Image: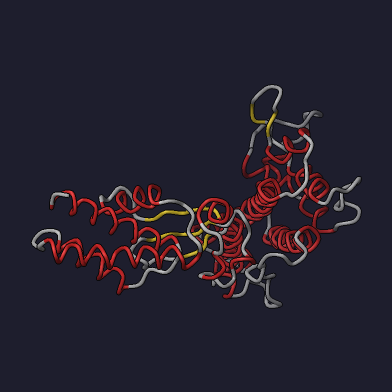
Amino acid sequence: MSLEELKRRIMDKCDIAQAIYALSWSITPRHIEIFEGTRALLRHGNRSQLEHAEFVLDVNIQTAKNAAGYKGGNDFALELGRGYREGKFELMQYPKVVIDEWLFERYQSVFSTWKKIQPHGLIRIDLDGKDKDLYLPEASLYEDMCFAFNQCWESRSERTIPNQRTKAGIKAHIFYTRASIISAYNFVECYLNGLAFDFLMTAQRTVSPEDRDVLNEWDTPKNRQKFVKFRDKITQYPKIILKRKTPPFTESSCPPMATLLSNINYRDAVVHNTPKPNLAGDEIPKVRDLIELRMEDAGCIVDAAVELVLLMDKTVNQGRYDMSWLLPRTAEGPFPAKSFA
């Protein structure tokens, strides 16, 4: 083997080792030093030094693979490591279900709370090991809702106390009121979509084509998207997942669901506002709802959003996943600081 061929092989092994360590959340500053030192050695090292460096890399690759039972293959790791080194991307994110199915056999050995994470949760991979994190879409939208409502709460005096009013302050209060409501419905729907995805990816039983289409929001005969209404997601998703004959959640049996559905006109007034009158022609409902929206309405809606998701998760997932991030409002009014932890 020529010296140049040896150097190319060592560079590839550097990329492979760095990628597998990063994928398994095991990469440390010491590993980075080894990889950088080896790449520097390629510029001036002799054959004996290079062969020793390759031996060290082989040991590191095997150690990295053993840490969590890597099964993704060298080609995948090489493509990832080389792409990062060449500056094609900075961070990678993989759903938990992908890591379990295709990349690792026992990720819980490097991620202690692994089994408590939802299958659709995204695991952030940084090949320098500086930005390891977990991203849960519904948790992010929950934080949006909390932030918007807390700002709405803090600015409430702008709308209620005459001598504290400013035009900008009133506008900010109105904006955060609207944002609270939109975020609440976004949060709940995101949770429902994650629920459907997790079931489809992990179900140990056969699902009828019709139910699969509902969970996928898809029309198989016409090969196109078919959106499911917000109410139907609340009723049908748990029904399908739990294999019930009737929906476990209805307006009459679930107060938070009733609250969200009876107030969805406020969400629609912001998202789909129109000056079109009602059928009687004597009222413009979406303009009316936009104008009449108040912080009290937002409070009822955000409370119902939190309560419904907690209730649904308890019923459907039965404590399988970590929901400690989902906190209700404090007795004082706003969401607690821990909502943004």
Question: Within the image, what quadrant is residue 27 found in?
Answer: bottom left
The residue lying toward the viewer, choosing from 266 and 284, is: 266
- Colour theme: secondary structure
Outermost residue toward the bottom in this view = 332
Q: Position of residue 105 (x, y in %)?
A: 55, 60
Q: What residue do we see at 25% from left, 50% from top? A: 86
Q: What residue do we see at 79% from left, 28% from top? A: 279
Q: How many marks?
A: 0
Left or right of 112 on screen, residue 208? right
The residue lying toward the viewer, choosing from 30 and 176, is: 30
If the image is split into quadrants, where does the C terminus sit?
bottom right
Q: What residue do we see at 32% from left, 63% from top? A: 58
Task: Give the answer, above or below, for where 267 lies relative to 106.
Answer: above
Left or right of 217 on screen, residue 165? left
Q: Position of residue 195 (x, y in %)?
A: 69, 52
Outermost residue toward the top in this view = 222
Q: Position of residue 316 (x, y in %)?
A: 78, 57
The residue lying toward the viewer, choosing from 106 and 290, is: 106
Left or right of 196 on screen, residue 112? left
Left or right of 146 on screen, residue 245? right
Task: Give the answer, above or below, for where 116 lies relative to 245.
Answer: below
Q: Position of residue 156 (x, y in %)?
A: 61, 66
Q: What residue do we see at 49% from left, 55% from top? A: 71
The residue lying toward the viewer, choosing from 105 and 197, is: 105
